[in-house]
Structures are given as structure tokens and as C-alpha cells.
């Protein structure tokens, strides 16, 4: 009997945990289109390559002379609490025509495919429409000149990066984005858009998740 009680208790706790997670808006296999806004994640490629890049496996992005700065990590459907992932049928893959929409945005085609599978399937759009929306969102963001033309290692605070993006993009404020870092190195800037991609919007949960380092390194392109 004690063993049975323990088993039932474990099952109940597992059910409660799943329900709490669903209530918070996290979950695989949600209904496509069921989200509140978008997050455009712009990865600082030199930071990615310094932290995670295997130069032999990521030559397109991290090889000598790649020279990449901000690249698209993804356009993510987001909820006010949490976010959905993997919402579409597993067999639905982007066509060559659809992937042409992503050219010049993602550092590699494999990343574009992965982002469609994990996040694009939750958008409620076709692959071609999703990648067109990625381009649309990216073209709405102006990278601050000090970062767009960076040719040497720099030191920034997260709030100064946010202020620079706000100054370069009318209507964008610090509470509509966050800066992500790891080991005091810039990883990416995440900018929140309305669901119809007509403008920026506040996103408290995303904003709160930002970098807490006092100062961060912004390595130059190699």
C-alpha cells in the first residue's frame, strides 16, 4: 500500500506540474496561431561564436573572415506568460521556395529549418509566410551605428545597448526588449512586436529576463 500511495502521489504531482506549465503558457504542440506577440531575436554572431561556436562545424557563421554581426536567431510567437513550441505536424518542412525567403537573414539554412520547426509552426502561417514575416520584422529594426560598424572589441552595459536601439528605432523603448548575455558576453538582443508586426510593444516577461551583468563584452567580428 505505501508503494501504491507513493505512485499515486507522484502521478498527481506530475499532473499538477503539467497543468501549471500549461497555464504559464509553455508547451509543445499548442494550437498554431495561439499567441500574443512576437519576439525577434537578433544574435550577436561574434558573441555566439566565442561562447558556443565550433569553428569547424559552424564555418558559415564562425569561420575566419565570416565577418558577421547581428544575424536573425528567430522570430518567436510569445505569450504574455510563456511561449508555445513545436505546434505543427512533424512532416511539414519548408520548401526550397519558402527557404529563399530566409536567405541573408539566418546565418545557416539549418538554423532557418530548425526555427521553422520549433517556432514557425506556432505562428499559424505557412513556411513562406513565416519567413516573409521574419524578413519584415528584421527590416523594421535599425541596428545602432556603433554596433552595425563595430570593428573592435567593446564594453557596454545592457541598458546602454537598449538605449542605443531605442535611439535608432522610433517607437522602441527599453521595456519593449531585452539584452541576453552569458559569461558577461553579449549573446543577443530580443525585440518585441505586436502580433500583426505593425509595431513594437511592451513585454514585461521578456524584459525581466534580460542580462544582469554590470558590464558585458561585445567582441568584434573576426
Image: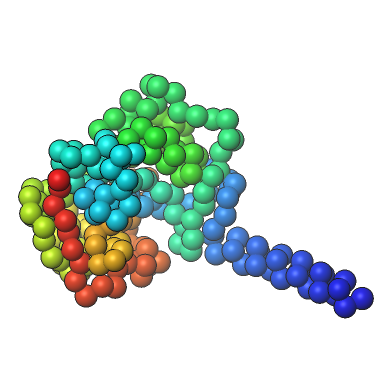
Vertical comparison of 60 with 42: above or below: above
Q: Among all residues in the image, which is located at the extreme front?
A: 56
Q: Is residue 126 left or right of residue 179?
A: right
Q: Nearer the viewer, residue 214 or 119?
A: 214
Q: Is residue 22 left or right of residue 164?
A: right
Which image quarter is the N terminus in?
bottom right
Which image quarter is the C terminus in?
top left
Percent across and percent down for residue 12 are 76, 69
Percent across and percent down for residue 87 are 55, 43
Vertical comparison of 188 with 138: above or below: below
Q: Among all residues in the image, which is located at the extreme top?
A: 97
Residue that appears at 29% across and 30% down: 103
Q: Quadrant of residue 16?
A: bottom right
Percent across and percent down for residue 124 are 49, 39
Percent across and percent down for residue 171 are 21, 57
Residue that appears at 75% across and 70% down: 10
Q: Is residue 145 at all visible to an observer of this figure?
A: no
Residue that appears at 40% across and 66% down: 205
Q: Quadrant of residue 86?
A: top right
- Give the number of callouts: 0
Residue that appears at 25% across and 67% down: 184
Amino acid at each position: 500500500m505505501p508503494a501504491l500511495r507513493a505512485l499515486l502521489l507522484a502521478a498527481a504531482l506530475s499532473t499538477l506540474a503539467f497543468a501549471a506549465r500549461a497555464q504559464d503558457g509553455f508547451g509543445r504542440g499548442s494550437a498554431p496561431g495561439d499567441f500574443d506577440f512576437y519576439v525577434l531575436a537578433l544574435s550577436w554572431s561574434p558573441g555566439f561564436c566565442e561562447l558556443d561556436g565550433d569553428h569547424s562545424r559552424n564555418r558559415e557563421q564562425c569561420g575566419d573572415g565570416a565577418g558577421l554581426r547581428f544575424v536573425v536567431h528567430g522570430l518567436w510567437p510569445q505569450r504574455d506568460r510563456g511561449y508555445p513550441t513545436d505546434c505543427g505536424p512533424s512532416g511539414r518542412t519548408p520548401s526550397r521556395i519558402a527557404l529563399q525567403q530566409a536567405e541573408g537573414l539566418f546565418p545557416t539554412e539549418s538554423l532557418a529549418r530548425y526555427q521553422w520547426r520549433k517556432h514557425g509552426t506556432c505562428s499559424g502561417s505557412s513556411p513562406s509566410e513565416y519567413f516573409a514575416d521574419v524578413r519584415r520584422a528584421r527590416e523594421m529594426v535599425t541596428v545602432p551605428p556603433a554596433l552595425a560598424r563595430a570593428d573592435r572589441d567593446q564594453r557596454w552595459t545592457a541598458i546602454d545597448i537598449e538605449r542605443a536601439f531605442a535611439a535608432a528605432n522610433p517607437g522602441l523603448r527599453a521595456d519593449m526588449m531585452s539584452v541576453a548575455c552569458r559569461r558577461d558576453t553579449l549573446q543577443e538582443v530580443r525585440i518585441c512586436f505586436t502580433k500583426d508586426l505593425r509595431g513594437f510593444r511592451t513585454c514585461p516577461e521578456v524584459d525581466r529576463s534580460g542580462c544582469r551583468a554590470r558590464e558585458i563584452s561585445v567582441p568584434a567580428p573576426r
